[in-house]
Image (tube, coloured by chain):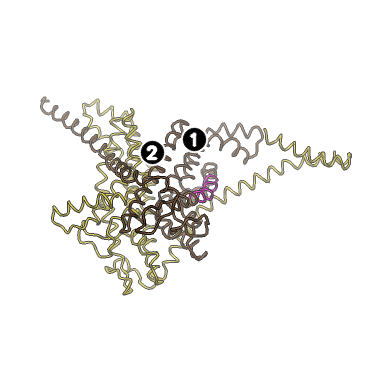
Chain colours: A yellow, B brown
C-alpha cells in the first residue's frame, strides 16, 4: 500500500545518505532498517490502541468528574441545610432561607403538564408514520418536519413564546377569570409540549414499525378493523417502547432551561395553580447563578443542579434499558 | 352478525384514522407559526449594517450583531476542534471493542452524557475553567459546548462503523496492514459520510445552546476574537435582548433569531440531504 512505499522511500533516502558516507556500511544499515521497520509499526499500533483506550476511559472520567464536581460543590449547602432543604417551602436568599420545594414543584408540574399535552400528538405522529402511512412523500415530509421541531433552538421558542404565546394565554386567563399574568407555568408547559413531541414520536414510530406483520395479518384475518388492530395488537406490542419514548421526552422537559426561563415568570413562591408564575430547577439556576454572592446560596443552587442531574440520569437510563430490551427481543 | 354493528366498527376505525391524521398534522402548526413569525419580524431588521456593526446603546438607532456572529463562529470552531477528534476516537474505540468491560462503562457514560441537562454542563464548565482561570472566557464556553457535542459524535461514529462489513477489515489485515492503518485508511474513509453527518448534526445542536454559555462565555457588547476573554454568541444575545425592556434591543433580537434559525435549519436540512444521498443511517 502507499504507506509501505513511503516507508521504502524513507529508508532508501536514509540509505543514500549513509551510502555516501561509506559504501560498505550502507548494506549493514539496510539490513538493520529491514528488521526494525515492523517493530516501528507495532509501536505505533500500540500507541494508537492505547490512545483509544484512554479515550474510552476519558468518557467515564468525564461523567464521574461531573458527578464529583456537583457533589463537592454542593457539600456546603448539604452540610448547612441537610435533607430538609428539598422540602423547605421558602426560598429567600436575602434572609438566608433556602428551600427547594417551590422549584421541585414547578419543575414537576410544568414537565408533567407538558407531557400530558404532548402525548396525544406524539403518539398520533408515531401511529400515522409507523402504521397508517409508512411510505410516500407526504409522510416523509411530516417526519422531517417533526424532526425539525427538535432542531429549533430553545431560546427561539422562548422568545416566540414571550412575544406571541404569552399574550394569547393572558387573554385566555382573562376569559376564565384567573389573574391575567400571561407568563407562568401554563405558558411554559405549552412551549415545552411542542419542544418534546419529536422525541417520543420518532422512537414510537420505529417501535411501531417493528411490530411483526404476521401478528397484524392474523388480526385482520379474524375480521378486525384497522383501529381494532392498532388497539389490540400494535399498541399492546409496543407499549413498553412507547413508554420509553415518553420517558425520554420527560427527561428533555425536566432539563429544558432557556424557553422555560423566558416564559415561566421567575418567582420563587410555591405556585398556587397551573396559571401562576413560578420557577423550575433549571430556570432558577440560570437566573440566580451569577448573582449568588454567598457560599451557601451558590452551593444551594448547585445542589439543585445535582438533583436535576441525578433525576435526568435515572429517567434516561430506565428509558434506555427499556429500548434495549425491546430491540433485542 | 348484524350489519349495524359492523358499520359502527368501520366508522369507528375511520374516525380514529381521521383523528390520528388531524393530530399528526397539528404538530406542524406551531413550527410553521414560529417560522412565519420569526421571518416576518426579523426580515426587515437584517441588512448590511446589521451584520457588520456591534450593538449600539439603548436610544441610538442602528447597531448590529457582528460581535455575536463572530463570537458564535469562534466558540463553535473551538468546541469542534476539541470534541471532534476525541469523539471520533471514542467512537472507534467503542465499535472496535464491543464486549469489553471498559467499553460497557464507556458506552454507559456516553449515554449519561447525552441526557445531562445543558444548564448542568454550564455549572461544570464554570467550576472547571471559569474559576481556575479567574474570569469568564469564550474558551470555557467552547469546552461546555464540546461536552455537549461529544455524545452525538461518538454515537454517530460508533453506529456508522458498526454497520461496515467485517470482511473489509479482514481484507486489510490479510494484506498485512497494522491496526491503526486499517482504521485510518480503510474503516474511517468507508464510514466518513456517517461520521461527517454526525459532526454536522452536533454543530447544529450546539449552535442554539444558550444555557451552557450563561456563566461561561457570559457575553460581551464589543467585538473580540480573544478566546480567553468573555465573548458574545447569537443565542446569548437573543436571550439578553429578548428579556430586556427596550424595543430597539427586541428588534436586534428578532434579526438575530432569524439568522440563528436559518443557520440551524439549513444545517439540519443539509445533513438530511447528505445522509439520504450517501444512504447513511443514523
Does the magenta stretch mainly form a helix, a strand or a loop? helix
Q: Nearer the viewer, residue B62 or A245?
A: B62
| Local SS, label 2 | loop
Q: Are marks 2 and 1 on the same chain?
A: no
Reading the image, the residue beneath label 1 is: B163
The residue drawn where x is 32% and y is 49% is A157
Above or below, A79 against B228 in this view is: below
The N terminus of chain B sits in image quarter:
top left
Decide whether residue A213 is among the magenta residues: no
- Across and down, in percent, residue B91 comes to 52, 44
What crowding class fits label 2: few (fewer than 14 Cα within 10 Å), some (14-19), or many (20 or more)?
few
The subunit letter for the residue under badge 1 reads B
- Residue A2 visible? The answer is yes
Q: Nearer the viewer, residue A7 or B270?
A: B270
Percent x, y of residue B226: 53, 57
Q: In the picture shown, does residue A75 fall above or below A29?
A: below
Quick check: B60 left or right of B13? right
Q: Which residues are magenta?
A: B76-90
Amino acid at each position: 500500500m502507499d504507506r509501505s512505499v513511503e516507508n521504502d522511500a524513507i529508508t532508501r533516502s536514509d540509505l543514500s545518505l549513509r551510502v555516501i558516507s561509506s559504501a560498505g556500511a550502507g548494506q549493514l544499515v539496510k539490513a538493520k532498517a529491514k528488521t526494525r521497520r515492523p517493530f516501528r509499526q507495532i509501536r505505533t499500533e500500540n500507541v494508537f490502541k492505547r490512545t483509544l483506550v484512554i479515550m474510552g476511559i476519558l468518557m467515564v472520567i468525564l461523567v464521574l468528574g461531573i458527578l464529583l464536581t456537583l457533589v463537592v460543590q454542593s457539600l456546603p449547602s448539604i452540610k448547612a441545610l441537610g435533607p430538609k432543604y428539598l422540602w423547605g417551602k421558602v426560598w429567600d436568599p436575602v434572609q438566608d432561607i433556602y428551600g427547594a420545594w417551590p422549584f421541585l414543584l414547578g419543575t414537576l408540574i410544568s414537565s408533567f403538564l407538558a407531557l400530558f399535552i404532548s402525548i396525544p400528538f406524539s403518539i398520533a405522529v408515531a401511529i400515522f408514520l409507523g402504521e397508517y402511512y409508512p411510505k410516500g412523500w407526504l409522510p416523509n415530509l411530516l417526519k422531517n418536519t417533526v424532526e425539525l421541531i427538535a432542531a429549533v433552538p430553545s431560546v427561539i421558542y422562548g422568545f416566540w413564546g414571550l412575544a406571541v404565546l404569552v399574550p394569547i394565554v393572558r387573554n385566555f386567563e382573562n376569559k376564565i377569570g384567573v389573574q391575567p399574568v400571561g407568563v407562568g407555568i401554563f405558558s411554559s408547559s405549552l412551549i415545552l409540549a411542542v419542544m418534546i413531541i419529536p422525541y417520543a414520536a420518532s422512537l414510537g414510530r420505529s417501535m411501531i414499525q417493528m411490530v411483526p406483520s404476521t401478528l397484524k395479518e392474523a388480526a385482520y384475518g379474524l375480521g378486525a378493523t384497522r383501529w381494532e388492530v392498532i388497539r389490540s395488537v400494535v399498541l399492546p406490542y409496543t407499549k413498553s417502547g412507547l413508554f420509553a419514548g415518553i420517558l425520554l421526552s420527560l427527561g428533555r422537559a425536566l432539563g429544558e432551561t432557556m424557553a422555560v426561563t423566558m416564559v415561566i415568570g421567575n418567582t420563587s413562591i410555591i405556585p398556587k395553580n397551573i396559571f401562576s408564575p413560578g420557577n423550575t430547577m433549571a430556570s432558577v439556576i440560570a437566573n440566580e447563578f451569577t448573582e449568588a454572592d454567598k457560599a451557601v446560596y451558590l452551593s444551594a443552587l448547585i445542589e439543585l443542579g445535582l438533583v436535576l442531574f441525578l433525576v435526568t440520569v435515572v429517567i434516561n437510563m430506565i428509558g434506555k434499558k427499556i429500548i434495549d430490551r425491546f430491540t433485542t427481543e | 352478525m348484524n350489519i349495524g354493528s359492523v358499520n359502527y366498527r368501520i366508522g369507528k376505525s375511520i374516525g380514529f384514522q381521521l383523528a390520528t391524521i388531524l393530530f399528526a398534522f397539528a404538530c406542524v402548526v406551531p413550527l410553521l407559526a414560529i417560522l412565519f413569525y420569526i421571518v416576518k419580524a426579523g426580515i426587515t431588521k437584517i441588512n448590511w449594517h446589521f451584520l457588520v456593526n456591534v450593538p449600539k446603546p439603548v436610544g441610538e438607532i442602528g447597531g448590529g450583531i457582528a460581535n455575536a456572529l463572530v463570537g458564535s463562529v469562534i466558540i463553535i470552531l473551538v468546541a469542534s476542534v476539541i470534541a471532534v477528534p476525541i469523539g471520533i476516537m471514542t467512537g472507534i474505540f467503542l465499535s472496535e471493542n464491543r464486549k469489553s468491560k471498559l467499553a460497557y462503562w464507556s458506552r454507559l457514560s456516553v449515554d449519561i452524557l447525552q441526557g445531562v441537562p445543558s444548564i448542568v454542563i454550564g455549572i461544570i464548565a464554570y467550576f472547571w475553567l471559569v474559576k481556575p482561570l479567574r474570569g469568564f472566557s469564550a474558551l470555557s464556553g467552547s469546552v461546555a459546548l464540546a461536552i455537549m457535542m461529544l455524545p452525538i459524535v461518538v454515537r454517530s461514529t460508533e453506529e456508522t462503523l458498526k454497520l461496515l462489513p467485517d470482511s473489509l477489515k479482514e481484507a486489510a489485515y490479510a494484506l498485512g496492514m497494522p491496526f491503526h492503518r486499517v482504521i485510518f485508511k480503510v474503516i474511517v474513509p468507508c464510514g466518513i459520510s456517517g461520521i461527517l453527518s454526525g459532526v454536522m448534526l452536533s454543530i447544529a445542536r450546539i449552535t442554539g445552546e444558550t444555557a451552557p454559555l450563561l456563566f461561561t462565555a457570559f457575553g460581551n457588547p464589543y467585538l473580540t476574537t480573544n478566546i480567553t476573554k468573555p465573548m458574545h454568541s447569537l443565542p446569548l444575545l437573543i436571550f439578553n435582548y429578548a428579556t430586556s425592556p427596550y424595543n430597539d434591543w427586541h428588534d436586534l433580537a428578532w434579526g438575530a433569531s432569524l439568522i440563528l434559525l436559518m443557520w440551524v435549519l439549513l444545517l439540519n436540512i443539509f445533513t438530511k440531504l447528505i445522509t439520504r444521498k450517501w444512504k447513511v443511517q443514523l
